[in-house]
Image (spheres, helix red, strand yellow):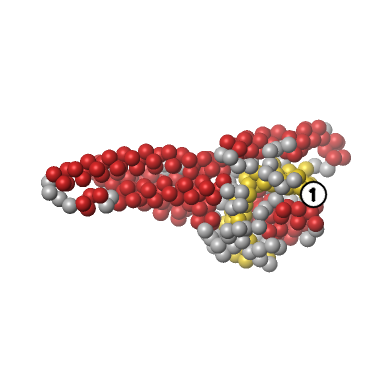
Amino acid sequence: MGSGMAEVLKAIPPPDAKPHVVMVSGKGGVGKTTVSIMLGLVLAERGDTLVESLDQAKHLLEYLSLSEVNREFKVFGRLSAMQFDTGVGVSKLGREYVWLMQRIMPGLKVLNAESVLDMVRNAPGLEEEVYLREVLRLYSYDRYDYIVVDTPPTGLTLRILNLPRLYKFWVERLISLRERIVSLRYVIARSLGQGDEVLDDPVLYKLKEIGERYAVLERELLSPNRTTFVLVSTPEPLPVYEAEKTTEFLKSLGSKPGIIVANRIIPEDIASKLGVREIQERALSKLRKLDCRRPCAMVEIPMVDSVPSSLDSVKGLLSKARIDLYS
Ligand SMILES: Nc1ncnc2c1ncn2[C@@H]1O[C@H](COP(=O)(O)OP(=O)(O)OP(=O)(O)O)[C@@H](O)[C@H]1O
Ligand SMILES: [Mg+2]
C-alpha cells in the first residue's frame, strides 16, 4: 500500500481499548459506503477490521456480494463486513417499551398489548434508538481492533448523535418522577403495615439502566481515543454545506472530525469544459478549511468513469486517492 494511505492511519489513533470506532457520515449519495470500504481496507492492514453498514439502502450487500443481513462475512485479509438491518431490533425494543409503558402508566393496560405495541413501533425515534444500541454494542465488540460504521444520511446521523443527550434529559426526569411515586407507595405500604418490597421497583431499575447506557455511549462517542469521525462530501455546495453543519454540531458536543474526504472530484480540464471548475474549487477550499482534529487527514478522490461496484474497484479507487496530513 502506498505511503499516502499510511498518512490516513495517522489520523486514526491505534486502539487503546478495542475497538476504535470510525463513524463515516455525509449527505446521501456522496460515497459513504465506498469510503467506508476504502477505510476498512486501509485499517485491515493494521488490525482486524469490521465494516458495518447501518444504511438501510443496504448497498454494502451488493458492493461486497454479502448474502445476508445481520451476519459478518470475511471479505479480504483481516477485513470483514456486515449489513445491519433494523427490523428485528425494532420489534424487540418495541416490546421492551410496551412493558415499561404499561408499568409507568397502568391506565394503558386497558388497551391490549398489540395496540400499544403498534403505537410504540411507529413512535418517532424508535429506529434511531435501535441504531444507537447497535453502535453501543459495537463499542464493546472487542473481536475487532477497528470498526468502520457506514451511517445513514447526515440528518439521521446528527439525530442519532443528539439522542444520548435527549434521552438523558428525559430519563433523568422520569427517574425523579418515579422516585416520588415509589416513596409515596412506600409511605402507604408502611402505614398499612407492609414491607419494603415496594422500594425494589423494576421500573426505576429499568429507567436507571437506560440512563446509564446513554451516558456510556455519549462518553465513547466523544472520546478521541475511541472514536474518529469521518466526513464525506462531494465538491458541490449542498454536501459541503452539510459537512460544515456536521462539523459545527460536533463542535457543540466538544468533538471534531478526524478525516475529511472529498469524493468524486472532476478532473480540472473536464471541470473547465463543463463550466463547473470554479464551483468545485470553492467547495474544495471550504472542505480543506473545516475545523479538523490534529493530525487531520484530508483525502481527495477523483471521479472515475466506471462506477465502482466491487471490492476490486474500491481497491482501484484507493490507489487514485490523494492524502494530505495536517498536523
Ligand atoms: N470516486 C467515485 N467516482 C465515481 N463514482 C463513484 C465514486 N465514489 C462513489 N461512486 C459511486 O457513487 C454512487 C454512490 O456511492 P455510495 O453508495 O458509496 O454513496 P453513499 O453515500 O453510501 O450513498 P447512500 O447515501 O445512498 O448510502 C455509487 O454508485 C458509487 O459506485
Ligand atoms: Mg451508502
Quadrant of the drawing holding the N terminus: bottom right
Residue 92: x and y in percent read 41, 54
Label 1 CA crowd tier, 10 Å (few <14, some 14–19, many 20+): some
Quadrant of the drawing holding the C terminus: top right
Q: Does residue 281 show up? A: yes
Residue lying farthest right? 269
Q: Secondary structure at mark 1?
A: strand
Give the quarter of the image for residue 285.
Answer: top right
Query: In this rendering, would 227 be left or right of 176?
Result: right
Query: Is residue 166 or residue 284 the one in the foreground?
Result: 166
Residue 165: x and y in percent read 48, 40
Query: In this rendering, would 212 be left or right of 307?
Result: left
Residue 82: x and y in percent read 58, 59
Q: Is ligand 1 less than 8 Å from the beta carbon at label 1?
A: no
Residue 163: x and y in percent read 49, 42
- Residue type beneath disc 1: Arg
**Which residue does the image show at 58% across and 58% down from the upper left?**
17
Query: In this rendering, would 114 be left or right of 23?
Result: left
Query: Is residue 307 or residue 254 the one in the foreground?
Result: 254
**Which residue does the image show at 66% across and 63% down from the upper left?**
47
Query: Is residue 64 or residue 82 the one in the foreground?
Result: 82
Q: Which residue carries the number 1 mark?
A: 322
Query: Is residue 67 or residue 280 the one in the foreground?
Result: 280
Q: Does residue 94 show up? A: no
State whether residue 90 is above or below residue 123.
below
**Which residue does the image show at 30% across and 51% down from the upper left?**
202
**Which residue does the image show at 21% across and 45% down from the upper left?**
186
Question: How many dots with numbers?
Answer: 1
State whether residue 225 is above or below residue 245.
below
Give the quarter of the image for residue 251.
Answer: top right
